[in-house]
Image (cartoon, rainbow, N blue to C red):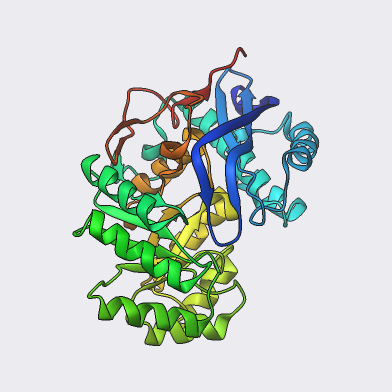
Amino acid sequence: MNTDLEIRKVALYPLTVPLKATFSIATSTLSVIENLAVTVELADGSLGWGEVPILPQVTKEDQETARDILTREGALLEGKNAGSWRRIANELRERLPDHAAVRCGLEMAMIDALMHSWRIPLFRFFGGCSDNIITDITIPICPAAEAERLARQYKADGFSIIKTKMGHDTGSDLDRILAIKRGFSDCRLILDANTGYTVEETLEVLSELRRAKINPDLLEQPLVRDDWDGMGRLAREAGVAIAADESCRSAGDALRIVREGLAQVVNIKIAKCGVMEALEITAIARAGMLGLMIGGMVETRIAMGFSAHFAAGLGGFDWIDLDTPLLLATDPVKGGYKTEGPRYFLDTGGYGHGGSLMVDN
């Protein structure tokens, strides 16, 4: 056994960062993130970084609960060989079936530490298909005038795909979408209701948009997670590609979506399932001819960098939704990917995902 890869230490850091503006979706409103950063240090001195997102009504953990679980699990990881990361990830899944965000943070940090030990960038570990990605940008639930202003700003910044949150009220949602198109008429458009609609409301909104000659490229998770019949109906009748997000948290969910024709696209968020299971979901979606989307919670460039390397390395992701670092008031991360408008450049000469917190270690 290569003892250089032995996990010597797992450490935690608070990751509290304000947003530029209040971020509202159908299920929650956020003005500051209160995540946790995780480090895994190997015997050879290699240090990897991961992130545990805390998002009310989405993740099961608050910051205190996540810290307690990470402290316990970190002690169990010490002495294990990080080269066996899949076995370790499977053990984490068995011990923590309901705490995917915590598992994800540990898996990220462990894999990142391995990349530093092996001296390769993370996108090459995942396959090396590309060394850059282009993200969309999100407009939250907000007044129509603000949505139009943001759309104009994002057009000037070089973005081509606008994602807008919806799900509170069909009337105000329609007003917001029309305003976005006034501000950026030729943008590609993703709609995300975050489980806030019924089937009937969804079909009504799409009908109104067609009357306004607006054709969204993608409609993400309009219905509650377990409305499988409704998702199937929309996949057949909506006339727009349906993406499963909250309905796809595991490989088992992905298999059901494929078998029953419940969506045309799956949104893979590593924090929903962990890195190992995200790879399994990707394989199932590809075998089932589903489109691939990569997304995130509200995270810094640590988690979004890891997800960007994941999607770029594997390739085949038609939809990239990794914009949340652009919505934060400050950037607590040093190193990592570089940005040019919506494009993230991943091959910056470093190893792993390259990002770390500005703290003394």
In this orientation, does residue 165 appear?
A: yes
The structure residue drawn at horizontal position 20% and vertical position 59%, both measured from the top left corner, is: 185
Q: How many marks?
A: 0
Q: Quadrant of the C terminus?
A: top right
Horizontal relation, residue 299 to residue 235: left or right: right
Q: Is residue 319 above or below residue 205?
A: above
User: What x and y, as percent, mark residue 226?
Assistant: 62, 76
Q: Nearer the viewer, residue 297 or 255?
A: 297
* Quarter-of-image position of residue 204: bottom left
The structure residue drawn at horizontal position 39% and vertical position 65%, both measured from the top left corner, is: 191
User: What x and y, as percent, mark residue 273?
Assistant: 59, 55
Horizontal relation, residue 299 to residue 219: left or right: right
* Quarter-of-image position of residue 10: top right
Q: Nearer the viewer, residue 88 or 187?
A: 187
Horizontal relation, residue 192 to residue 72: left or right: left
Q: Is residue 68 above or below residue 273?
A: above
User: What x and y, as percent, mark residue 149?
Assistant: 31, 47
The structure residue drawn at horizontal position 60% and vertical position 71%, both measured from the top left corner, is: 225
Q: Is residue 46 above or below residue 152?
A: above
Q: Quadrant of the N terminus?
A: top right
Q: Is residue 293 above or below residue 353?
A: below
User: What x and y, as percent, mark residue 142?
Assistant: 45, 54
